[in-house]
Every structure is written in structure tokens, then in C-alpha cells.
Amino acid sequence: MYYGADYYPEHWPEARWTEDAVLMREAGINVVRMAEFAWTRMEPREGTFDFAWLDRAIDVLAGHGIDVVLGTPTATPPAWLMRSHPECFLVEEDRRPLTFGHRRNYCPTNSTYRDHTRRIVAAMAEHYAGHPAVIGWQIDNEFGDRCYCDSCVRAFHIWLEARYGSLERLNAAWGTDFWSHIYTAWNEIPLPWSGSHTHNPGLALDYRRFMSDAYVDYQRLQIEILRQYDPGKFITHNFMGFGYPKLNYYDLAQDLDMVAWDNYPRFQGLRHASMLALAHDTMRGLKSANFWVMEEQSGPAGQTQLGKTPRPGEIPFWTWQAIAHGADAIVYFRWRTCRFGAEEYWHGILDHDGVPRRRYREVAKVGAQLQRAGDVIVGSRVKARAALLLSYDSRFGFQNQPLNSVFSYERVFESYYRALWNRNIGLDVVSPDADLSDYAIVIAPSVYILPEDVARRLREYVSAGGALVTSCRSGVMDEHNVVVNQTLPGPLSELCGVVVDEYDSLDSVDAVVLRAEGPLGDAQFMSGVWVDVLEPQGAEVIARYGSDYYAGQPAVTAHRFGEGLAVYVGTVPDVAFIDVLCRWLCEEFDVRAPLDVPDGVEVVERNSDAGRLLFLLNGAGGERVVDVGVGGEDLVSGDMVAGHVAIPSLGVVVLRA
Ligand code: GAL
């Protein structure tokens, strides 16, 4: 198994490199990522290349058995380039171009920037082609941000023309009759710089899609060069988890061999373990495949302000949780804390002084464990019988029209994820295009933009026996962000056996009483944010509103459809209600945790030909005793375990049954 660190030899005297390599090796590190910000070092002047320093660094590492992933350095263009080509700067929504001095400050559609990109990527790829220690490539660093420059305006017009073919089609799709926005030439179409103005939602959605495609295209430009010069090596990019909303990550992942991502659990506060799990599952779902963590937090983090130091045991715990959810390699950010630059506060495994201390020892301990266990784990697959459907189009739609001040697609999504995570149900996060047939339960929260073919596949899924949960604001918009010409939930109403009679947008999360009934038992909860007053058309009512003018009206329904069941949740319920709903569905559809464990212990199952691996992660905050039955080998300790096993706080057992 690959285990490593992000390494910046250019930040340290060459005399130190060997000591670094020795320390790495002693910690079990066998891979580093390098060079992703080192453009000016590699090309100090236009067309003049210097790879000698990087060659020497790679030689030192390779001499100690450490392989290298090289990053293309395009996230940080050289000063000489941006001085002579200021048109390459990314322009922000307020139309102000970024300036030099940070990173991610370039426009991905700018042809000059793309030419410079081709040159540095080709030079790197040609120089390292076939190098035995260079095992793969990372493209750029954490793609993102939207650009509003003139080049993007032109590229947007070309993108629109390819998508719609004619202005008649575009005008019809967007509904440009509204406010006399009918376009008579492509170059009349603006970018939706919002400010205080509302743009046509079709335009706003397409601009977001276009900008996402612009990065996909820019990434492809680099992929093609790397494949041409250095075929056979993996190409990846470091994504930013579930939380990053500006790119369609399914599209960005498509051309890559593998997804990698950057996991920072304790930065501005400690993120709940379920949210880390969601991020891992989302990243695994991008290609339905295992992934790497390319940056795993290894020290206190911050740029201008410093967050808390990872508590003893947290770094190993985060590492094992990532592996449990499908990571096949862990690379820590960063090897040694830099003494200068914007991230002086962003700590790595070693502090500024390069002295190995507690965090190094924790990393080394996991390194030793992985030397024993890693190869058994790598390649095994997470087992999930439930899935959540993640729609970037819907995210983009809500970014343009957020409904009200408290609605959040992400929070709704997280609340369903967390209810199932609490029950230790294995979960996949899947795209709207995914094959759903293997899942017993699919939750599709607020699929606001719902193309007809996705609706059709949801009907087929339920008809064949699946359980679907969908929620308010699903099926509202067609693929052009135009409200469907049907009673809501539009293309889902037949499936859900329900129509929305009236709705109410609320600015509070606990505004309305919600009373469960029928299979959910008689209990009272709260809901808010949004209220769909439902009129069942064949569905059974399983919860009603208990206050406001819709008191007594249906809020949540369940509809037998074909062999399956479709649940429509017309509001944003509190976690207790979602928990009751999920418990009922899991019982009905026989979806269980792989093992019964005390609260606060996370269980994740990975499977391979070598057998079944159960990851038991104790995040409860104190010792927990887990009954592992006949048990098996604990890959972490190397011991055989059976019966009642005491797991200390932040302890991990990986049971090979
Ligand atoms: C990541 C980034 C790294 C480093 C790290 C800490 O987002 O990829 O280069 O900046 O955060 O800030």
C-alpha cells in the first residue's frame, strides 16, 4: 500500500534531503507527491527549463525506496508569465481581475495560458517519461473558482452554440421572452454576473455548467499531453470532498484514472466523523472506485489563524477511517511545516525545525501497521446496499436561487446521510446517471433539476423493488432550469403517488410541528425550511403537519409502486424524524449494519477475494466493548480477536473474518 507525504524539497537545503528520506523510510513512507507548485523553479524563464534539482531530489528519494507522484504546477503560474500576460488572470464576479501573489489566479479558457500550460506540462512529461520512480501524475491542484473574463465570455458562446445549435432553441429552452431577453446573436449573451440582479435561471445554470466544463477541458488538455509522453502511469487530481460545490465532480473525474482528495478534519473546528465519511464516500462514488487521499491532515492547520493541534490518536484515526471508506493510499500534507510563505501556520508531520515529535511517531506507527495490513486491504471494495443520489445540476440551480435563507441542499443531503451513517449502513454516493439496481434503498434529496431520463430510471428502480426517498423541491425544474409544466413533484408524482397542493417557504428550521403516523408510530417532531402541503393520489400518509394553517395536512407519504416503495418527504424534518424514517426503511428492506456495535463506533465493510474486512472505528470518546463473535485476525494489531473486544477511544480494529 502506498503511504506518503507531500514533499517540497525546493523549500529546504539540499543537504537536508537525505535525512528527510531516511526519516520517511523509518516512518514507513514509500511515496511522496512533489512539484505541484514549482513552475518557476522548473521554468525560471520562458522556454528555459531546469529539472536538475528535481532529478536530484527524486534520486535521493528513490535511493531510499520512495516513489514519486509529480504534480503539474499550473495552479501557481510564474510571475514572469503573469506580468507579460495579465489577460491570463482570472476575473472575479465583480469583474475585478485577480492579481499576482496568491494561487489559482488564472483563467482556464485563456488561450495564452493554455499555450504556456502545454509547454510546461510537455516539458515535464517528456523529461520524466518512463522514469521508474515516477509512478503517476497529479494535474494542477484543487481545481475550482469561476471566471468572468472576456475569454470566458467567448468560450461560453461557443459552448452554448454547441449545446443548442441555434438561437431559436436556446431562446425557447431558457424562456427568454421574459423581460424581452430574446437573443438575436450569440455574442449578445452575457455572463450572469449577479451582483444584486437576478438573471435568467437557464443562463445562470448553463454558465455554471460551462465553467465546470471549462476546467474539465483544461484538465483534458493536460491529460492528453501526459498520456502522449508518459503513457501507462496513473493520472489523478486532488478533489475537495463533498463540500466543494462549484464543479461537477463526476465530469471532472471521468477522464482521470483515479480520484484523489484532500482531507482536513480539524481546521476551523473538528468536523463530525459522519461528514468525513460522507466526503470519502462521495469521492469513492465519483468513479465508483477506490481513491487516494493526496493530502491528509497531519498537524494544526491554518493560513492566517491557527486551528487546534490534532489530538493524540486523531491522525491515525482519520487515516484508518479514510482507508475504511475506500482509500487505497494515504499521503499526508505536508512532510515538514514551511518556514515561509502563505502557509507558515499550516503544519505538517514535522514542525518548522524538522525535528520528529509526537505527530511523526503517530504517522510512523500507522506506517508499521500498514506494512503488515496494507496489501490485504488495497483493492478491496466497500460494500453498500444504500445510496444517496448527488446532483451537481441541482446544486448549481440552488446556488442561483437558494429558495430562502435557511435552505441548504448540502445540509439536507448530509442529514439523510448521517441518519444512515448512525446506523452503520454502508453507503454509496452516486451520480444521477448511476445504475441503481444493486441498492435496496436510494435517497435522492431535493433533486431540483431532474431530467426526464433520470426520473424514468428512478421509476424503473422502484418498480423493480427498490425503496426510494425523495424530498421537497424534487422534480421542480427541467434540465434548462425551467419549471416543469406539471403539478409537482412533476415527473415524480406518479411514482410517489402524490401531488403538491400548495407550498410554503419558511425562514426557520424548526417552524412546524410534524406528526408521524402509521408505520412510523405516533410521535411528534419538528420540521421547517420548506413545506409542501401534499395531496395523496394513491400514497399512504406517514406524517402530517401539526401546526400553522396546514395543520392536519399530509407532509410525508409512502407509495407502493410496482415491487418497491417511494417515499416523498415534503419538508425538511429534524434529525429525529429522519432517523425514525430511516429505521423503518432499513427494517422493511432488510438493510443492516455489518455488525451491532455500541453508539459512537463506526463500522465499515470492505470485501475482496481475500475475504471480508470489518473496520471498527471507536470515535465515541471513551472505551467501547464490541462483540465480534467468532472474530478473526485484527490487521491493525496482528492479534487474533474473538468475543468481547475492548476498543480504546480513537482505537481501530480491522477484523479479517
Ligand atoms: C490544500 C492545498 C494545499 C495546501 C493545503 C493547506 O487545499 O491543496 O496545497 O494549501 O490545502 O492549505
Image (cartoon, rainbow, N blue to C red):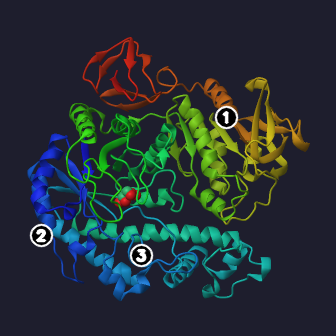
Q: Secondary structure at mark 3?
A: loop
Disc nearer the start of the sequence (3/2) = 2
Res. 514 in view: yes
Q: What residue do we see at 67% from left, 56% from top?
A: 452
Q: For ligand 1, tell me if the residue under mark 1 lies within 8 Å.
A: no
Between 116 and 9, the residue placed more toward the observer is 9
Q: What residue do we see at 22% from left, 83% from top?
A: 47
Give the x, y percent position of residue 620.
47, 27
Measured in 3D between alpha carbons, the distance from the residue under mark 3 to the one under mark 2, in whole angstroms, is 27 Å
Between 254 and 201, the residue placed more toward the observer is 201
Give the x, y percent position of residue 117.
32, 76
Which image quadrant is residue 112 in?
Answer: bottom left
**Amino acid type of the residue tagged 1 in the rendering:** Ile
**Quadrant of the drawing holding the N terminus:** top left
Pointer 1 residue = 578
Give the x, y percent position of residue 264.
41, 48
Measured in 3D between alpha carbons, the distance from the residue under mark 1 to the one under mark 2, in whole angstroms, is 58 Å
Between 541 and 624, the residue placed more toward the observer is 624
Q: Which mark is residue 236?
A: none
- 593 displayed left or right of 447: left
Q: Secondary structure at mark 2?
A: helix
Residue sitting farthest toward the right: 549
Pointer 2 residue = 52
Pointer 3 residue = 106
Disc nearer the start of the sequence (1/2) = 2
**Amino acid type of the residue tagged 2 in the rendering:** Ala
